[in-house]
Image (tube, rainbow, N blue to C red):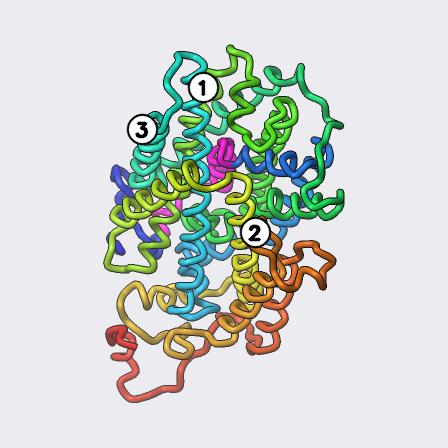
Amino acid sequence: MSHAPSAGHALIEQHGVDTIPEAERTSTPRDVLSILVGSNLAFGVVVFGWLPVSFGLSFWASATALILGTVLGIALTAPLALVSLRTATNLSTSSGAFFGVRGRLLGSVIGLLLSLGYTALALWVGGDVVVGALNRMFGLPAGGASYVATYGVLAALSATAAVFGYRLLLKLERVLMWAVGALLLAGLFAFAPHFDGSAHGGYLLGGFWPTWLLAAVAAGLSGPIAFITLLGDYTRYVSPARHGDRRVLRATVAGLFLGLLVPQLFGAFTAVATGAGDDYVGGLIAGAPLWILLPLLLNGLLGSAGNTGLMLYSMGLDLDAVLPRATRPQATYVVAGAATGLVFLGHFVWSAQDAVTSFVLVLTAIGTPWAVITLIGHRRCRGDYDRGSLQVYNRGTRGGIYWYRAGWNVPATVAWAAGGAIGLCAVDTPVYRGPLLPLTGGIDLSFVLSGALAALLYVLLSRPSRGRAGRLPAPVPGAAALDRAPLDG
């Protein structure tokens, strides 16, 4: 992990998960909005709008499921942006205030899994759009070699943007917000002649309401949940001395709402218009007028690079937090390689619908309790953090008010584990069905049960405190040296 401050003119960001100095916290709430909108107008997000249609829902039923799920997800996720606004570091490191300076590795691992899966999905779908468009426009063979080359180019572009870091990504997303937004708008006109909002197929779960609820969770709620560990990557560069909590929260809510719903509704619209069925990209390219193929190709290339670049940046931070001796650029290259490997599995091995649905439902079940505990802890401590104590693990030392028991806060860890376990027992995916489903009427309530149980246990097991989270250890001889001791257990 790098501790050296980054100069304002530096080409490559030097900060990892260390505390951002106040002088460098020059971003604004508008920048947070730009990043959230610009990074999400890509096919990696568009494809989630196809999911409800592939489940058998009409466009209007899909739209209501997407809207409700997204709103619920934003209500849970958006306040997390305020944590890093106060700590000046990323969210997984910030969660050490509640899980302990070692327990916050749970957040790093959850963030890595979420970002890894969504990065692979974005590269996979974006690459398929590029290859399909080139095939129709110029007759490029749509064989394995074309896909491998395209995925490789997209991964290289994304990794380059991620390595350069926050400032370059911010400039990129500002441009993409308007450019890719215009491409999506053009797509509405292109596919409108074949749109029938009332058409639907056979319901995936046999009935309307179970299928509609599945869509609300798998496609709607999962979008904001993907950001539970990401939001702090942007708000850590915003100064609370210049921008209040309400402004930052409003920008985050607006960015998530527009950035997720616009592409998802576009995905549902085009899936219905093209009769995409089980193959969204294939149906989209086959049903597209020739004049819209170039905009689709540009979105697949540039939009995907912007989306995956931001995800890789977050993954680099999370891996940097797990392996403090690695630099952020080194960690970013490692996760870029892992994500590219998953892309090949996604294209050549797995079923698209089954893989996407299973992935988002399982990670929603284990990510929700972590987010709930972090929010309760932030509420309790009223945004008052000891920034130095949050960096104990990263510095290779021990001690501080977040040391708890050997670096772990047992009540928070137990609450998360119990919440995640009950969520996995209640999840309903095409690959795995939890044993509690008969008790919930066959409806996937995993995120509700996991979040509720985690909140209940955390409140019951932990002691509420005003002011800073954690507790100071009893004074002992040589306590000053304790904080400098190596992390040896």
* Quadrant in which residue 143 is drawn: top left
Quadrant, the C terminus: bottom left
**Above or below, comparing residue 373 to residue 85 in the picture:** below
- Does 3 sit left or right of 413 as displayed? left
Q: Amino acid at mark 3?
A: Ala
The residue tagged 3 is 149
Residue 417: image location, x then y, percent = 52, 69
Mark toward the start of the polypeptide (1 vs 3): 1
**Could you give the CA–CA distance between mark 1 and mark 3, rounded to whole angstroms?**
15 Å
Identified by mark 1, the residue type is Ala
Q: Look at 67% across and 60% down and name the residue there.
A: 437
Where residue 170 appears, x then y in whole percent? 40, 36
Q: Is residue 406 left or right of residue 205?
A: left
Magenta-drawn segment: 21-44
Q: Is residue 304 above or below residue 370?
A: above
Q: Are marks 1 and 3 in contact (CB under 8 Å)?
A: no
Q: Secondary structure at mark 3?
A: helix
Picture coordinates of residue 1, whole percent (x, y) = 27, 56
